Image (cartoon, grey):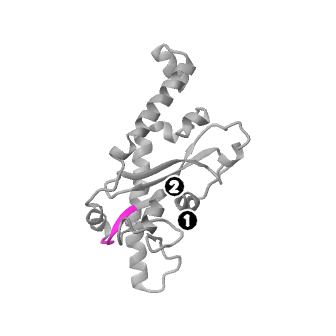
Amino acid sequence: MLVAVADYVGVSKSSAGRIVRDVSRAIARLYSNYIYVHNNTQEDFYNIARFPRVLGAVDGTHILMQSPNSNIGEEFRNRKSVFSLNVQGVCDAHLRFINVVAQWPGSTHDATIFNNLELRAQCENGVYGNRWLLGDSAYPCKSYLLTPLLHTHSINELNYNQAQIKTRNTIERCFGVWKRRFPVLSLKIRLAMETTRL
């Protein structure tokens, strides 16, 4: 794809790569202007399935990439035996990202990424008060991170799971919208590691 862009614009592949890198870094510097926790998040999430006090929904998605061809290449091979980045995202009820981390190899477990997030530390330190993140069963259940119950024994537990899953599904939809908006994320990224991992 980079070769096609370079040919179309009339620059060399290496120039196109530098342009992509520079523009990507410029966009990344604007991160905090556009990706943040919105004030009305709790009410908006509540309107989905009557699940109270939700800060956001968290999950990971794999972005396929070419083999890194380096000593650490195998770290990027995920459980499906393809090379990828494991991108962790947290979104609000309107499918807007409030946190995105795109630097972990595909073999990294979602819970490991979450444990290294600044957002996790903020939640543990009470920055967001008594609000919760919703995650799937790949995450550990914490006072600030609620996951589905593996076995339900009552109607209340079943209702909890249904509301949690329906509300948490926003992150799945958010990743779907993101990948449709930027189709390259559904294909294999064919860039050098320093370009792929900003």
Which numbered disc, 1 or 2, marks the residue that appears first in the sequence?
2
Q: Quadrant of residue 42?
A: bottom left
At horizontal 41% and vertical 65% (from top left) the residue drawn is 133
Question: Are circles 1 and 2 on residues that touch, CB within 8 Å?
Answer: yes
Q: Position of residue 147 (x, y in %)?
A: 47, 71
Q: Given the current orientation, which residue lies at the most extreme right position?
A: 71
Residue 138's tag is 1
Q: Residues within 10 Å of mark 1 (few under 14, many from 20)?
A: some
Query: Image height check: is 168 above or below 151?
Result: above
Q: Nearer the viewer, residue 18 or 164?
A: 18
Q: Residues within 10 Å of mark 2 (few under 14, many from 20)?
A: many
Q: Position of residue 87 (x, y in %)?
A: 52, 49
Q: Position of residue 69 (x, y in %)?
A: 71, 36
Residue 60's tag is 2
Q: Is residue 27 left or right of residue 103?
A: left
Q: Which residues are magenta?
A: 50-56
Identify the amino acid type marked 2.
Answer: Gly
Identify the amino acid type marked 1.
Answer: Ala
